[in-house]
Image (cartoon, rainbow, N blue to C red):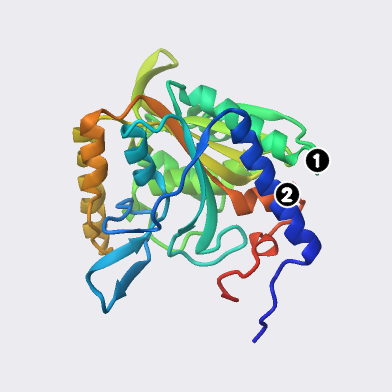
Amino acid sequence: MNWQANLSPKLLRKRADILLSIRQFFQNKQIVEVDTPSLSLAANTEPAIESFTCQSAAHKESYYLNTSPEFAMKRLLASGSGDIYQMSKVFRAEEKGRWHNPEFTMLEWYRLGMSYTQLYAECVDLIKTVSSPYTEIANTHYRSYASLFINSCGIDPHSCEQAELIECIYAHNIDVSFDLAAASRDVCLFIILTHIIEPEFEAQCLTVVYDYPLSQSALAKISMRSIDNDQYAVAERFEVYWGSVELANGFQELTNSEEQLERFEKDLLVRKERGQIMLPIDNHLIDCLASGMPECSGLALGVDRLVALVLGLDNISDVINFDFENC
């Protein structure tokens, strides 16, 4: 068994310098650093994310390791914190891969009174600021989710039938290990996005994708958009990519407690249908939204991915001292 760290002393210092530059970026904007608990009695209900469960002899209840500090940070916002950020360890029970470690470092921040379009511009600014001593980002592209599908596949993702999505997947000879007819529409959209569209993103460039389908709204507000003279409801959500690697996911944050509770309950119905573990809803979040959380936008960014890309590495294990196979 190898007891040694993955990082050399030189790389260790480079990672530390990058994290310091992130903190300096927020300090210059007078955004306050906060910390919140890693353990919670509630969990993330999103079906695409699985939580680690923790138990001890001293406590009868099951606790969950945070998949994101989001819920607790929103309680701070509702308590009057103002603009805040946090850099912390989070945990997602997924297979370890080239760009995912089950324990990883997440940067999350919230801006009061700022639109999600302003926030993704600030995210691009952060990435360029942090990367400038090490590498140059050639360009930044801004693309709506719909335009990506229309330009790459001739499909409007907001209005097309699922049969069109399945036909597109088979036409591109994408090998799937399950029956697409039994899959959800979002699964088909995800396959096209990851296998056809994302590989087309320019290397060494940032791509901001915005206005996601209503079914992928998560914790985002909903608004109407006109596409070819038709009106569609879209989620005010965005993702930021470096090349084909997703770095950040952000929202115009939902502040309606009743709508948020309804979304959590829908998540649990999906989890039940899929035979997934049923998880407790975070009622603290629902209560804080009901109390009047201020209008804001927020995002989460994968720090380990950012450090690896800034340093020209292609595996986040190269920038984590002890990854999941060596912890």
Q: Distance of mark 1 from mark 2, alpha carbons?
A: 10 Å
Residue type of the residue flagged with mark 1: Pro
Examine the rendering and report whether any part of residue 215 can be seen. Answer: yes
Q: Quadrant of residue 231?
A: top left
The numbered dot on residue 289 is none
Of the residues under marks 1 and 2, which one precedes in the sequence? 2
Depth check: give the residue in front, 297 or 225.
Answer: 297
Q: Nearer the viewer's eye, disc 1 or disc 2?
A: 2
- Going by the image, does 167 lie left or right of 60? right
- Going by the image, does 127 lie left or right of 108? right
At numbered mark 1, what does the secondary structure look like: helix, strand or loop?
loop
- Does 115 appear above or below 110? above
Q: Quadrant of residue 291?
A: top left
At numbered mark 2, what does the secondary structure look like: helix, strand or loop?
helix
Q: Residue 235's x, y, as percent?
A: 38, 30
**Quarter occupied by the C terminus:** bottom right
Q: Which residue is mark 1?
A: 133
**Quarter occupied by the N terminus:** bottom right
Q: Are marks 1 and 2 in contact (CB under 8 Å)?
A: yes
What is the total number of numbered labels drawn onto the structure image?
2
- Does 36 appear above or below 204? below
Q: Residue 15's x, y, as percent?
A: 71, 54
Q: Residue 164's x, y, as percent?
A: 42, 39
Which residue is painted at 47% across and 36% down in the image?
A: 84
- Going by the image, does 311 lie left or right of 42? right
The numbered dot on residue 17 is 2
Q: Residues within 10 Å of mark 1 (few under 14, many from 20)?
A: few
Which residue is painted at 71% across and 34% down in the image?
A: 129
Residue type of the residue flagged with mark 2: Asp
- Going by the image, does 76 lie left or right of 142? left
